Amino acid sequence: MARKSIEKLADKIIQLSPEEAEQLSLVIKAKMLPEIAKQQAGLLEQQANNPQMAAMGRRPGQNMPMPTSRDAAVGGLLR
């Protein structure tokens, strides 16, 4: 029984006009926002609690300070 109602729903969705499809898209997004926000909050909490995960997406050594002219001179890069 559920299968027939799902098929009918799919048929209705396929037959939507572009304007109706846009409205449906907005309604679905609005209804999903609270759940998406919860998931993102959970991921951010996990990331904050796990330093290795927090470092993902960063280049290794990204925290190194820029070399100064003194550092360059010591390295023989400046004349």
Image (cartoon, rainbow, N blue to C red):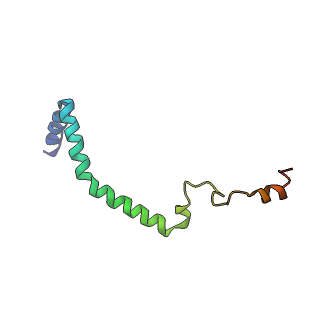
Residue found 14% across the figure and 40% down from its top: 4
Q: Nearer the viewer, residue 57 or 62?
A: 62
Image location (x, y in percent) of residue 76: 86, 53
> How many numbered badges does the structure rendering display?
0
Q: Nearer the viewer, residue 73 or 58?
A: 73
Residue found 83% across the figure and 56% down from its top: 73
Q: Quadrant of the N terminus?
A: top left
Is 42 above or below relative to 30? below
Is 45 above or below relative to 7? below
Horizontal relation, residue 51 to residue 62: left or right:
left
Residue found 43% across the figure and 62% down from its top: 44
Image location (x, y in percent) of residue 45: 42, 66
Residue found 84% across the figure and 59% down from its top: 74
Horizontal relation, residue 23 to residue 63: left or right:
left
Most extreme residue toward the bottom is 49
Q: Quadrant of residue 39?
A: bottom left
Image location (x, y in percent) of residue 26: 23, 43
Is 53 above or below relative to 8? below
Q: Quadrant of residue 17?
A: top left
Is 4 above or below relative to 34? above
Horizontal relation, residue 52 to residue 8: left or right:
right
Horizontal relation, residue 17 to residue 62: left or right:
left
